[in-house]
Image: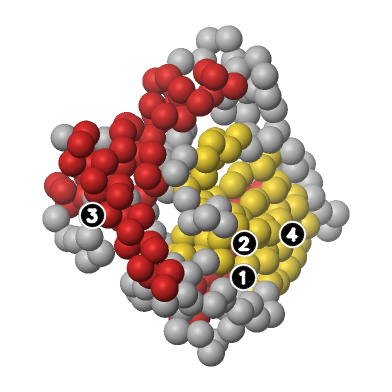
């Protein structure tokens, strides 16, 4: 089995090289999709929500794929999330100012993929979310999950049993690889909680979506601040696609 998947890794690398021969230019970026919404909670306090998302130059075939995704995020925030949260904070006693800000970083703008890391900050709380889009499989409004990135599922797969099986398979392997990396780094650039166990990752780390791509189009998995150590920083663990496939 491992030999077969090692071959799969080699085939994947070959495909990347072949795709690279018809290299696509990096996506051009247009003016950001950005806004700030202020809602009064009372006479003295406001709920302020600001966001900034990337917007791709409409001349590129990938533009609708990416732009529609983030436009939905923005519309959902303005039409649902902000009013709902404002009502919640208005009910607090006493209601105080609340500021939420979302910003982004483009982590990969390559031949095959475009990847973005969005960071949301609210007071001392920071939450990170990665989004990855295929420039070859142009499906507006959809980001790429890990099993599809690895080739374990084909685009358009509708068999939910197979989707769940392949997702669980990829998640279990990546959690193991990430845990090994955390243990190796502990006491060096990390100070893990003393009672932290590998099983803890199952409750707050979901590899099928908790990643972004780096400039080499390989995944970087992330753990939310405070999950594995007493810190407000996001912990990142880069793992190449070839390494993941080779370990399966």
**Mark pair 3, 4: CA separation:** 41 Å
**Mark pair 4, 1: CA separation:** 20 Å
Q: Position of residue 150 (x, y in %)?
A: 32, 51
Mark 3 and mark 2 in contact? Answer it, CB < 8 Å: no
Helix, strand or loop at label 3? It is loop
Q: Quadrant of residue 5?
A: top left
Q: Sequence order check: which comes first, mark 3 or mark 2?
A: 2
- Can residue 134 be seen here? The reply is no
| Disc number placed over residue 106 in the picture, else none | 2
Q: Sequence order check: which comes first, mark 4 or mark 1?
A: 4
User: In the orientation shown, which residue stands out farthest toward the top?
Assistant: 194
Q: Read off the residue under disc 4.
A: 48
Q: Nearer the viewer, mark 4 or mark 1?
A: 1
**Mark pair 3, 2: CA separation:** 26 Å
Q: Sequence order check: which comes first, mark 3 or mark 4?
A: 4
Horizontally, residue 166 falls left or right of residue 161, namely right
| Disc number placed over residue 54 in the picture, else none | 1
Q: In this view of the protein, which residue sits in the foreground, 54 or 151? A: 151
Q: Sequence order check: which comes first, mark 1 or mark 3?
A: 1
User: Can you say which quadrant of the picture contains the C terminus?
Assistant: top left
Mark 4 and mark 2 in contact? Answer it, CB < 8 Å: no
Tell me which colouring the rendered structure shows. secondary structure
Q: Identify the residue shown where x is 65% and y is 60%.
A: 104
Helix, strand or loop at label 2? It is strand
Vertical comparison of 224 with 181: above or below: below
Q: Read off the residue under disc 3.
A: 153
Crowd rating for badge 2 (residues with CA inside 10 Å; few <14, some 14–19, many 20+): some
């Amino acid at each position: 089995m491992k030999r077969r998947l090692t071959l799969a890794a080699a085939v994947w690398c070959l495909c990347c090289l072949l795709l690279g021969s018809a290299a696509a230019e990096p996506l051009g970026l247009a003016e950001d999709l950005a806004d700030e919404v202020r809602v009064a909670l009372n006479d003295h306090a406001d709920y302020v929500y600001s966001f900034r998302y990337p917007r791709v130059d409409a001349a590129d075939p990938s533009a609708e794929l990416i732009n529609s995704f983030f436009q939905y995020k923005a519309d959902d925030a303005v039409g649902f999330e902000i009013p709902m949260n404002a009502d919640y904070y208005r009910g607090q006693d006493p209601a105080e100012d609340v500021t939420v800000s979302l910003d982004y970083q483009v982590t990969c703008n390559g031949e095959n993929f475009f990847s973005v890391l969005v960071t949301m900050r609210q007071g001392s709380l920071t939450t990170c979310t990665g989004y990855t889009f295929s420039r070859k499989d142009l499906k507006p409004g959809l980001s790429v999950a890990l099993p599809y990135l690895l080739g374990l599922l084909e685009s358009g797969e509708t068999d939910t049993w197979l989707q769940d099986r392949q997702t669980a398979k990829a998640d279990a392997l990546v959690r193991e690889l990430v845990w090994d990396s955390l243990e190796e780094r502990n006491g060096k650039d990390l100070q893990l909680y003393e009672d932290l166990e590998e099983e803890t990752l199952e409750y707050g780390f979901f590899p099928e979506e908790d990643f972004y791509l780096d400039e080499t189009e390989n995944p970087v998995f992330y753990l939310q601040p405070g999950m594995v150590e007493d810190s407000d920083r996001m912990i990142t663990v880069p793992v190449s696609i070839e390494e993941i496939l080779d370990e399966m």
